Image (cartoon, rainbow, N blue to C red):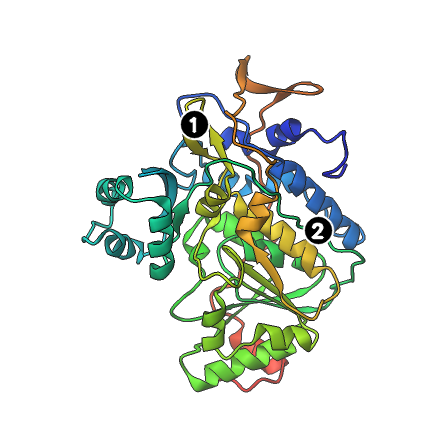
Amino acid sequence: MTESDPAADAVADWAASGAVALTGRPDGPPLVPPGRAATRARALAARIAELTGGAVRVDGAALLAERAAFTGATRQGPVSAGVGCRLLRTADGWAAVSCVRPDDPMLLGALIGTEVPDDDGLWPPVEAWLRAHTGAELAERATLLGLAAGPVASGGPVAPVQMPLPGEGRSVEGLLVVDFSALWAGPLCAHLLGLAGARVVKVETPSRPDGARRGHPGFYRLLHAGHRSVVLDPGERSGRHALRALVEKADIVIEASRPRALAGFGLDAHASAAAGTTWISITAAGRAADRVGFGDDVAAGAGLVAREPSGVPLFCGDAIADPLTGLTAAARALAPPPGVPHDISMTAVAAATLDPGPPSPSVAARRQGEGWVVDASGGPIAVAAPRHRTPAGRAARSGEHTAEVLRELRIPVP
């Protein structure tokens, strides 16, 4: 079944994905998210299976809720399943505001012009500031501050962003993947390429290790099992040299940084792509934008939110733009290199799953026995709980393979 197949039932795909169970208020029924993200995820997984000759077979829709199956996250309505993002009123609508990094309370204080505590007490002053400012004002200030926050798409015609799947694929067996990304989207891409036989090297810096290391160990292990870990310091000349040399050796590079950050490391995505490297660039809103974003606030900013009859938005799934983007990135990486970086905007990926037109209230599940069901075209479909695959090994300690990888690639050790 493909996304364009008339037999594809978006409601049934949503119900089977596990994401419906994570959507809605904790004391209310699960809600069906808008659009066809679960169907798109299934189509991407099918395309990845085709491109890898059947070597990589995953349930794309189930990947949308896989992290929650590890963490035990549940639906929290206007608070994200991972509790790091909130949907709050603005002067002219709604906004999604994330607070997940250690510096985010300080940045929120800078946003509103007053110091805020680093606990849940930060939200009341932020809410008060938002009610007096528009979504556009928030977006402008958040971009300047590097804060993951922005207005929720509020309706009107939504132009579907075309995200075409690649044509003829190529084997990645034995290819070197250098993964600079963190959290979920980029590591999922690297994980799928590793399942296809690629050699994955995860690169971190001493000051900015992957924040997912602080998350659920089982989920981190799932995405990183079998990958080697390298830590290099771009603040040192030898570290920058090793980073550039590692990129020169790579067949595929995955990164999720703003272009100016890469330039500071001495890395040129366009030059590498022109030389034949497949460069996968994952950003919140495209390489031309200087926006920071994570899976929940990006999805909400694209309009991928459930709606109550009153129009109040609620989060869909768990950081749903992340797994959608990871699947999209993997499908792109399995195509021949185009000579320019693959510019993969998480916002565009999420928006591409939505139908044109103003948002409508979300369909609610109904009780049946001890569980919930939704009515699809083929009849009632049970709302599945999030589920996860079993990790296939251990994840490397940070920097465990630095000397080994550099020696193997004949790169001078910093």
Residue 128 position within the rendered picture, expressed as x and y whole percent measured from the top left: 23, 40
* Amino acid, disc 2: Pro
Is the C-beta separation of discs 2 and 1 under 8 Å?
Answer: no
Tell me: residue 260, above or below residue 62. Answer: below
Q: Secondary structure at mark 2?
A: loop
> Residue drawn at (47%, 29%), measured in percent from left and top?
307
> Residue drawn at (45%, 28%), measured in percent from left and top?
24
* Amino acid, disc 1: Gly
> Residue drawn at (41%, 54%), measured in percent from left and top?
214
Q: Front-most of 262 and 187?
A: 262
Mark 1 neighbour class, 10 Å CA radius: few under 14, some 14 to 19, many 20 or more = few
Q: Which mark is residue 311?
A: 1
Residue 127 position within the rendered picture, expressed as x and y whole percent measured from the top left: 27, 40
Is 164 positioned to the left or the right of 405 in the image? right
Q: Earlier in the sequence, mark 2 or mark 1?
A: 2
Q: Which mark is residue 331?
A: none
Q: Is residue 84 visible?
A: no
> Residue drawn at (54%, 34%), measured in percent from left and top?
19
Q: Is residue 239 visible?
A: yes
Q: Front-most of 8 and 162?
A: 162
Tell me: residue 144, above or below residue 402. Answer: above
Q: Secondary structure at mark 1?
A: loop
Q: What residue is shown with label 2?
A: 164
Residue 226 position within the rendered picture, expressed as x and y whole percent measured from the top left: 61, 60
CA distance separating discs 2 and 1: 31 Å
- The total number of labels drawn is 2
Is 372 positioned to the left or the right of 46 in the image? left
Residue 270 position within the rendered picture, expressed as x and y whole percent measured from the top left: 61, 73
